[in-house]
Amino acid sequence: MLRSSLDGDTAVVTGASAGIGRATAHAFAREGANVVLAARSEDRLDDLAATVREEYDTAALVVPTDVTDEAAVEALIDATIEEFGGLDVLVNNAGLARGGSIEDMSTEQYRTMMDTNVDGMFFAARAAIPHLRESGGTLVFLGSFAGEYPRPSNPVYAASKWWTRGFAKSLSAQVGDDFAVTVVNPAEVRTEFGYEEGTPFEERFDEGEASEPAEIAEAIVFAAKQSPSMAAEIDLYRRDKFEIF
């Protein structure tokens, strides 16, 4: 069954300062949910919170967070519970990518990507689980097309997304009686993503050539509205995606 709205729910969005995270915050606020905005860029979060409050007349809490910092992630969830009394949705979105040859990748670059894409996902999920169990809510992981198919241009990023998908599905098997777990797998999305490699996707693709952040956000909201059923996995990519293979 699809719930008609998320009015009164509380959703935490990591990586909320831009791209998919920012669009997701808008989408949840539009549905009447309280939104908790987490990312490292406090200025961007403050601007987003002000916009959300004005446009949707809903609550927005800013909690600057580096998801690689275990204590900071726990503080994020604690602040959410203190402010709103519970947690209904965690959108585990924060991540980064770095491409190039493995032999040219430094250990520091490798560690930074894995710390964010793997440890960050784990820390946030672990902190949220007791509260999602209490609410019977939804945990959404941002996976990737790269987590389902080989990605020769950035193998470490792809591996981190294979981990995300495997972790999410295995966690779902463990907690399935208590709350929903969904993996959303976009291909290219017109965001700042990819700037580490020089040209972000929002510049690399024209409108209509790749997915827009709002499309991914709507899929995330769709997953959060499922009750008592669950959307286990949602793939989103342009219709001609497989023609390049």
Image: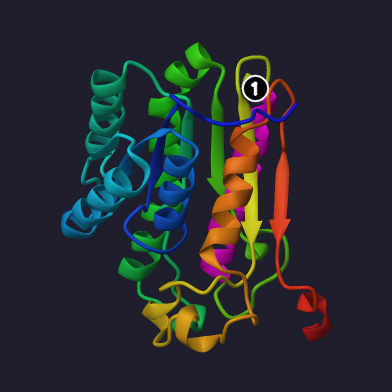
Query: Does 52 appear in magenta?
Result: no
Q: Position of residue 40 (x, y in %)?
A: 23, 54
Q: Point out residue 71 in the picture as x, y percentages from the top left corner.
A: 23, 34
Residue 207, image x and y in percent?
A: 58, 82
Between residues 2 and 171, which one lies in front from this camera angle?
Answer: 2
Q: Quadrant of residue 56?
A: top left
Q: Is residue 219 left or right of residue 229?
A: left
| Residue 221 image point, x, y percent | 58, 42
Nearer to the camera, 17 or 102: 17
Q: Main secondary structure of the magenta part?
A: helix
Whether residue 68 is visible: no
- The reply to whether residue 3 is in sight is yes
**Element class at badge 1:** helix
Residue range (magenta): 155-173
Q: For residue 76, what is the image quadrant? A: top left
Picture mark count: 1
Residue 161 appears left or right of 129: right
Q: Quadrant of the C terminus?
A: bottom right
Q: Amino acid at mark 1?
A: Gln
Using residue 47 as the reference point, say whether residue 147 is left or right of it: right
Which corner quadrant holds the N terminus? top right
Residue for badge 1: 174
What residue do we see at 55% from left, 44% from top?
141
In the image, what residue occupies the spot 67% across and 64% down?
A: 145
